[in-house]
Each structure stands twice: as structure tokens, then as C-alpha cells.
Image: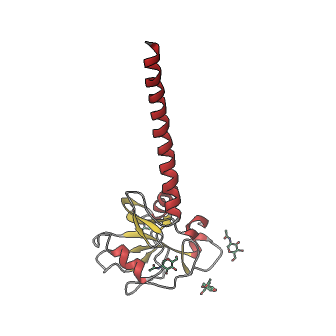
Amino acid sequence: MLRSRAPTAKLRMWLLITVLASLVLHSAVEEIALEEGIPCSKYQVAFNLSCYEFVRLQRTFTSAQSWCERGGGHLVFIENEETQQFLQNHISEVREWWIGLTSSSLLNETTEGSLIWLDTSNISYSNWHEDQPSLLANCGYILKNSGYKWGMTENCSQEFDFICEFGKMHSRWC
Ligand SMILES: *[C@@H]1O[C@H](CO)[C@@H](O)[C@H](O)[C@H]1NC(C)=O
Ligand SMILES: *[C@@H]1O[C@H](CO)[C@@H](O)[C@H](O)[C@H]1NC(C)=O
Ligand SMILES: *[C@@H]1O[C@H](CO)[C@@H](O)[C@H](O)[C@H]1NC(C)=O
Ligand SMILES: *[C@@H]1O[C@H](CO)[C@@H](O)[C@H](O)[C@H]1NC(C)=O
């Protein structure tokens, strides 16, 4: 009975196509959702239109930034107290964490070093540790055992954990 086998093969093919189509659709939906701020991948946490990833890999500042960029993001920008509070709830206080703070002299050797976020925006909200930012300022991080205060270090080759931010409109221009 050839006729009875044909529908089975058709059904298998149809199932395969359906599964593939749903996979494609799923990732498309996920992308659209990310544009709208939610949801994030399972490794990320959503907060106010961005997805944040707390990466427990010891990396230098530039390699941490590259890691974030490969996923379409950047080292985190902390532009208000609410974001600072959100981050504090997700990171260990006994470790250092790179954030997206740098000196403009590092981005552009010809200019005087003012401190900026990696998208070159000025720092309005800040949470510096006392004695910070230091004059020898190249790369920004959250100091350990400091109550999550920020500092700058001259030595960007140190290897710290880091926080990536994905999905905000301006991240695309970095
Ligand atoms: C949420 O994001 C918008 C747009 O970036 C910003 O204007 C606003 O201050 C943010 N609110 C909080 C609580 O972070
Ligand atoms: C560096 O800064 C100078 C002066 O502000 C500007 O003319 C130049 O285009 C900048 N270069 C880069 C790569 O941003
Ligand atoms: C950022 O700060 C610099 C130096 O204080 C200032 O000249 C510049 O106008 C500021 N830019 C913005 C967009 O506020
Ligand atoms: C910077 O930090 C790295 C890693 O801790 C260390 O090996 C290196 O000696 C430091 N460089 C300077 C100039 O302190």
C-alpha cells in the first residue's frame, strides 16, 4: 500500500518545516521584543528598556568591551541612581566590575582627558568612591568592598568581571 506511506513522509516533512519556521519566528520575535525592552536572553536581566549581563569572566577592560560588543552591546552606562541600585542587587560586592567609563584621552589621543561614557556622553550622575576619580584615570570600574562605589584605574590590563548592557537605542552607535 504505497498510498499509506506517502502521507507519513509528507507529515514528517511538514513537521520539520513547522519546527524550523517556529525557530526562525521565535528568534525574530525575540529580536522585536528586545527592541521594545523585554524580554532578554536567559543570561540577561531586563531593566528599563535594556538587558544587562553580569559576566563572571576575568577580562581586561578592552577585552571586556569587545565581549559585550560581540553581542551588540557595550560595557554598562550607569546614568542614574535607579540603574545603580538595580546593578547593586545583581553583583557581588567582593569583586571588581568593569563599567563603560573611560577617559576621552584613551578614545582620542589628541584631546585632554575628561571622563566620559564609552559613547562619549558626559557623566551627569556619578557614584565615585572618596579619592576618586583618580588623576591617573583610564578605565572605570566598581571597586570591591566599597559599597559599589566607582573608581578609575590607570591599569586597564587588570582582569575584572564586567557588566554588559544591550538593547538601548544609543548602544547601536557605539
Ligand atoms: C529609563 O530609560 C529612559 C530612556 O533611556 C531614561 O530617560 C530614564 O531615566 C530611565 N529610567 C530609569 C528609572 O532608569
Ligand atoms: C580627536 O579630537 C580632535 C579634536 O577635538 C578631532 O579633530 C578628531 O577628529 C578626533 N579624532 C577622533 C578619532 O575622534
Ligand atoms: C560635556 O562636557 C564638556 C566638558 O565639561 C563640555 O565642554 C561639553 O559641552 C559637554 N557636552 C555635553 C553634551 O553636555
Ligand atoms: C597592570 O595589571 C596587570 C595585571 O594585574 C599586571 O600584570 C601589570 O604589571 C600591571 N601594570 C602596571 C603598569 O602596573
Which image quarter: residue 155?
bottom left
Position above or below: 170 against 33: below
Position above or below: 115 against 5: below
Which image quarter: residue 122?
bottom right
How many labels, in total? Answer: 0
Q: Nearer the viewer, residue 80 or 1?
A: 1
Q: Nearer the viewer, residue 97 or 17?
A: 17
Q: Nearer the viewer, residue 159 or 44?
A: 44
Which image quarter: residue 142?
bottom left
What percent of the width, then of the height, locates residue 162?
Answer: 40, 65
The reply to whether residue 143 is visible in this rendering is no
- Residue at 36 percent across and 79 percent down: it is 85
Q: Classify the position of the N terminus by image quarter.
A: top left
The reply to whether residue 166 is visible in this rendering is yes
Position above or below: 111 against 23: below
Position above or below: 48 against 128: above
Q: Classify the position of the C terminus by image quarter.
A: bottom right
The image quadrant where one finds ligand 4 is: bottom left
Q: Left or right? Give the position of 147 relative to 116.
A: left
Q: Nearer the viewer, residue 45 or 59?
A: 45
What percent of the width, then of the height, locates residue 3?
Answer: 47, 17
What percent of the width, then of the height, locates residue 41?
Answer: 42, 57
What's the image's color scheme? Answer: secondary structure
Residue furthest out toward the top: 1
What percent of the width, then of the height, locates residue 165?
Answer: 46, 66
- Residue at 48 percent across and 39 percent down: it is 18
Residue furthest out toward the bottom: 130
